Amino acid sequence: MHEIKALSPQQLGWRCDPAHLDFETTAELDDLSEFVGQTRALDAVRFGITIRREGYNLYALGPPGVGKRTIVKSFLERKSADESKPDDWCYINNFDNRHQPHALRLPAGRGAKLVWDLNVLIEDLHTSIPAALEMEEHRNRLQEVEEEVKERQAKAFRQLAEQAEQQGIQLIRTPGGFALAPLRDGEVLSPEEYEKLSDAQRKQIQAAVDVLQGELRTLVEKMPQWRNEIRRKVKELNQETTRFVVGQTLAQIRNWYTDLPQVLKYLDALERNVIERADEFHPREEESADPAQAPRRHRLADAYRVNLIVENGQTDGAPVVYLEHPSYVNLVGRVEHETQMGTLVTDFSLIKPGALHQANGGYLVIEAVRLLQQPFAWEALKRALYSRHIKIESLGESLSLLSTVSLEPEPIPLDVKVVLLGDRMLYYLLHQYDRDFAELFKVAADFEEQMERTPENCRLYARLIATLVRREDQLPFDRTAVARVLEHSARVAADSKKLTTHMRTVADLLRESDYWATQDRSPQVSAGHVQRAIDKQVYRSERLRQHVLEEIRRGTLLIDTDGAVVGQVNGLSVIDLGKFAFGRPSRITATARLGKGEVIDIEREVELGGAIHSKGVLILSALLSSRYAQRHPLSVSASLVFEQSYGMVEGDSASMGELCALLSALAGIPIKQSLAITGSVNQHGQVQPIGGVNEKIEGFYDVCRARGLTGEHGVLIPASNVKHLMLREDVVQAVASGGFHIWPIETVDQALSLLTGVPAGEPDSSGQYPAGSVNQRISERLWELFQLRQKYSSEAMTEKPK
């Protein structure tokens, strides 16, 4: 086994040489018109936006901050600018059934004109119709109608009066109605005189009165008919006059809309309704004087107005709508209500559009998680996309929560491209559990979080920095500042060969660097200002890290950084606090004793270990058996634990440390506590890469530095993680001065040799390990345990029962 060399300072991260940048400040660089590092996503976005087929809506997936919204917005604005304006949409009164308003489609800009024209029409009708009905000619005709009917009525009563007079009876009009009374010599008989008449005379008079009473009753019953006839003829005259006025007023409007049959059809219906309601345009004197009648007149006018819900006359190209609060009503629209006399009422003028109406003919962009958080909104969107029309429905009525009068507006045809923005997990969950999702969102734009660190990409990144700086009117960045931003980008990407595409992180760093340069009154931003911004970001977030370090220094958290202990190793873990993560060492201990081949994971037994951590322990258990117990049963019982662990332990990055602690316990060889180890192990003893390697190294380094670096301190990491190293400058300097070391390891034997200072030993052709090696002592120990197990088993079998 060859000797393992510690990493040199040059291997601990990439350092960008400002001399390799061919500019002095970003002011010399052109703006970047393209998006870097997102070739695949850009192609998907371009395809998803361009294709006009059913179901080809777009889902842009990736973590927040990678520029999904910015890229989608840029593409949509360019694409929509070249497209034609969609039509305007209105809701109009359905005069046959006011609860089912009609939808009216007009070319872009014509909707606002129709609203204006009808408003002018209504004002004209409110003045011209009453004026026409007040004209002398019209009033004369009404008077003639009334007089003609009244004359017929008077004539009938005169004829009855003459007939009665011929029979000695007089028809008398009283305040209470009509009465019949007998006459003598032209005078009405008094009751006393009537009583003095003979029975024969009274009977004759009564018979005549009865006949006349019947005829009188017939005439009285005809009086309502005569009044109705007057009203009918008056209404016909009013309608005739109104028809003439409305016809003249609508003639010019009809000429303007000869190319729109639906508008002409509506104008015809409007004309019929105005003529039918002509009397309502003629306010009575008491109504004119009563301010309370104003709402009635307004409602009359509202019946003929147009509710313009989508107006695209002022837009440039197709609409692009960003729905920030995708609730059900904000998505599909709503029908509002007004309170009148304590009752909720509504009409077509209270229909309000939703985002689907506004984006119809264009594009609608929604944050997927916000959409799914709103009750019924996701189902409403799917229903609209499937049916290809927008139907406004009241949730309260559909759920039987309200019993107010509502409307059933006519659905509007839908032609929209929907873009959802969300993370990957949500995309995969929807794809797995919602069968409609794959049919409606067939295009996925998967955004990268990293890009290759090539000279060309570094140049593009510098132009990106220049673009962002100019866009926000910041100070120019000199080449040293750009170089430091590039280094930090590689650190955020956790890979010395990559740069991050998390634009939010980069933009925040640029803003804060500009702030510190402004505080120093510097004309430009330098590397020192960028470093200060980075340090301040860490300082604002590292409260918990400082507490952990303090507890380690005070001995509350037991971590040894010198000496050697059997069955004890310093493992490394990462605590992620959102925008800030830091590493902390953890003591891992192992014990071994005679048993039946069990390796007990105490974390798993008490349900503090996650599935991946438990998997790592089972792997090292399998490695132990296959490596050291191929010719005899594994006769050891071992236990592993993270000391002072009071929360969940997850991940397999500690499995190499756990294995080394267990092997140390078996061999009885102490492990140097000045070293820490991270890495996962497979069943063949190979070390596998892990995440958070920079934070883990720096976490142990901080503890060692606080206690004083001796030159013995260091960390063992998987060799496959070397390319991910982007360590802090103080760690690099400590390595350069020999105060700290980082070793790349590939196998468990390399780890044992470094941790114990004793060669691990490689087996010869007969499978025997060199004397004194770690592996040889482990094999001997396991053989001794096997013999002890055999001995106890034999004694138990030969022991006689008492």
Image (tube, helix red, strand yellow):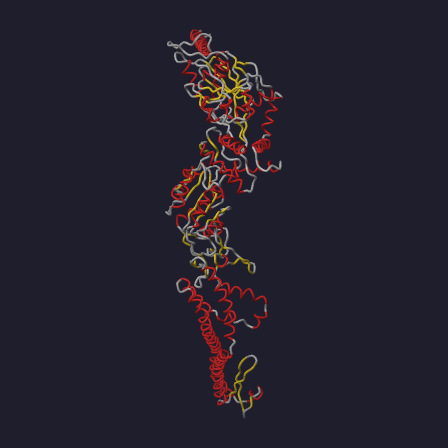
Q: Does 602 sit left or right of 105 as displayed?
A: right
**Is residue 468 visible from the viewing direction of this image?**
yes
**Is residue 800 visible from the viewing direction of this image?**
no
Q: Position of residue 509 (x, y in %)?
A: 55, 35
> Residue at the bottom extreme?
185
Closer to us: 567 or 167: 567
Q: Is residue 654 above or below residue 122?
A: above
Q: Position of residue 103 (x, y in %)?
A: 43, 58
Q: Position of residue 689 (x, y in %)?
A: 45, 24
- Which quadrant of the figure has residue 782? top left
Closer to us: 644 or 420: 420
Q: Is residue 200 above or below residue 514?
A: below
Closer to us: 376 or 174: 376
Q: Position of residue 752 (x, y in %)?
A: 48, 15
Rendered-image quadrant of the N terminus = top left
Q: Does 349 sit left or right of 546 as displayed?
A: left
Q: How many marks?
A: 0
Q: Is residue 42 above or below residue 455?
A: below
